[in-house]
Amino acid sequence: MTKIYNFSAGPAVLPAAVLERARDEMTDWHGSGMSVMEMSHRGKQFMSIAEQAEATLRELMKIPDNYKVLFLQGGASSQFSMVPVNLLRGAGKADYINTGAWSKKAIAEGKRYCAVNVAASSEAEKFTTIPDPAGWKLDADAAYVHYTPNETIGGVEFHWIPDVGDVPLVADMSSTILSRPIDVSRYAVIYAGAQKNIGPAGLTVVIVRDDLIGQPMDGQPVMFDYATHASTGSMYNTPPTYGWYLAGLVFDRLKQQGGLEAIARINHAKADKLYRAIDASDFYSNPVDPNCRSWMNIPFTLADAELDKTFLEEAAQAGLVTLKGHRSVGGMRASIYNAMPEEGVAALVDFMADFEKRRG
Ligand SMILES: *Cc1c(COP(=O)(O)O)cnc(C)c1O
């Protein structure tokens, strides 16, 4: 069987070592005689899995003690609502930075709760860059500033943290969390759907500074109040137990690999290899400003779009799957999250060179 490398944007590849460990523990977790899926979330066994996963995540990301880590459901999309519900605290307005499709979704939802000030946008540049922060029209009285550090569809990534003064900074890190070290203390809220860089779909991780918890808007569902989850160890109701367990295995694996500094070096090298291949050819191109190219999601087009279908078919035959670009962008997209091995990127680069030679 050909080795398969899966370039899906999400749900996405998981580390092979994690899947093998989950397989080995599937029907009998540590002599319990049960699968993790069958355990009570309030039992001692699952509690130990949950606590260990959180502890390892805190260690990996160096999360300060005054932050809560929540293991929720509802996806990053629910955070588009939970952020305003919890952070507005009577302010009635918030700043958003618009760098692409996911920013726009967050903005649309934010508008249901407050006056949204789009403080900067790269829409006129077709989301191929990040607006120069010197021109951002931030409002010092905004309840928070929301941005998307990595735009999964456009392949645009911030390689720096915006300076927003004392206004709480909120980041949708769905497709970049754990790809490199970050200074958590610069943020008020970090959230991420798990299915890109953490684990299976169905789990959402929220890291929130504790002074921002407990002042939700009136009349909102109890499940949308961060305090509901922060005060119960994310066990107000049944949490996504199996996803939480698998996330813990992924965190262990990242630690074994040397932590986020080591992971960042590998990610940078993988992305660099693919961008170099694209830039060195006249056949492939990536439209993104080189200063804000994503390490995680790399869209590219062929000089002749008529060849897209053939490219995808031949790539799949070579074991390189899910390379089709997002329907809104077209072309190809290679998502090369933490779990994509360097050999996968090397195989893609080799295939691209060979395809260009034969068909370009
Ligand atoms: C995938 C993605 C989302 C949506 O996540 P869901 O978990 O499906 O709600 C939001 N933001 C970004 C940046 C994403 O990549």
Image (cartoon, rainbow, N blue to C red):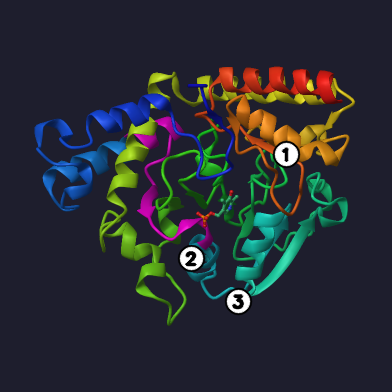
Q: Position of residue 306 (x, y in %)?
A: 84, 41
The range drawn in magenta is: 56-77
Using the image as rendered, state which of residue 163 and residue 149 is in the foreground.
Answer: 149
Which image quadrant is residue 45 in? top left
Residue 65 vs residue 321: left or right? left
Magenta stretch: residue 75 in it?
yes
* Residue that label 3 marks: 112
* Residue that label 1 marks: 332
Three-letter code, disc 3: Arg
Q: Secondary structure at mark 1?
A: strand
Q: Residues within 10 Å of mark 3 (few under 14, many from 20)?
A: few
How far apart are the two marked residues, 1 and 2, measured between alpha carbons? 33 Å
The reply to whether residue 83 is visible in this rendering is yes
Mark on residue 82? 2
Using the image as rendered, state which of residue 228 and residue 184 is in the foreground.
Answer: 228
**N-term mark: 3 or 1:** 3
Vertical comparison of 197 with 236: above or below:
above
Magenta stretch: residue 227 in it?
no
Q: Position of residue 223 (x, y in %)?
A: 36, 69
How far apart are the two marked residues, 3 and 1, measured between alpha carbons? 34 Å
Using the image as rendered, state which of residue 313 and residue 324 is in the foreground.
Answer: 313
Q: Secondary structure at mark 2?
A: helix
